[in-house]
Image (cartoon, rainbow, N blue to C red):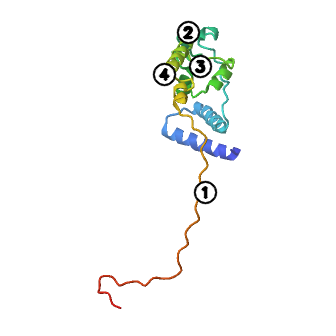
Amino acid sequence: MADETLLDLTALIVSNHVTNNNVSVGDVPTLIKSVHNALQGLGKAIVEPEPEQKPAVSIRSSIKPDYLVSLESGKKVKMLKRYLMTSYGMTPDDYRKKWGLAADYPMVAPNYAEQRKALALKIGLGRKRIAQTASVPVVEKATPRPKAKPAVKKSTTKAKAKPKGGPATE
């Protein structure tokens, strides 16, 4: 803002404040200075350094057989990927980058992954369909079709049309 605009706004704000509130004469210069400084700071963004976040637990102790511990909150979860997305809006790559984790850091508890794997194998996922391929009959080589007969040409003579429903006249 221009200095004249700041001075005009400061004068307007201070005069309105003094008319509506009891202010001692000695406090007026302090009030003017504080209002002017506040108006000057409006256009500037306050940049506060983001405090470096420490993990809730050590990286090594965050992987347990039955659960993973979130480094963000310390919460015990089986599926870290879903928890991170719903709670923090983070993808696994963002999480790994933030905490300096390896690319193969698990997002699912090891025992839970084994249970899911066993269930998938039990219902037949991950295997080729042996039973279905064996039951498909083998198709022998097809014999060639006989050539089609040429189409019969229509006659070019027109037949006389007989009137319908009436006596025949000749």
Q: Are marks 2 and 4 in contact (CB under 8 Å)?
A: no
Q: Considering the image in quadrants, where does the N terminus appear?
A: top right
Q: Are marks 3 and 2 in contact (CB under 8 Å)?
A: no
Question: Closer to the observer: label 4 or label 3?
Answer: 4
Q: Residue 91 is drawn in which quadrant?
A: top right
Question: Closer to the observer: label 1 or label 3?
Answer: 1
Q: Which numbered circle lies on residue 123? A: 4
Q: Which numbered circle lies on residue 107? A: 3
Alpha carbon separation for disc pair 3 and 2: 12 Å
- Where is residue 128? Give x, y as percent: 57, 25
- For image coordinates 69% across by 17% down, the residue present is 102
User: For the view shown, which residue lies furthest in the bottom direction?
Assistant: 170
Question: Closer to the observer: label 2 or label 4?
Answer: 4
Q: Amino acid at mark 4?
A: Ile
Please report whichever mark, 4 or 3, sits nearer to the chain's N-terminal start: 3
Q: Is residue 74 visible?
A: no
Q: Amino acid at mark 1?
A: Lys
Question: Closer to the observer: label 1 or label 2?
Answer: 1
Mark 2 secondary-structure assignment? loop
Alpha carbon separation for disc pair 1 and 2: 72 Å
- Where is residue 72? Give x, y as percent: 58, 18
Q: How many marks?
A: 4
- For image coordinates 59% across by 65% down, the residue present is 150
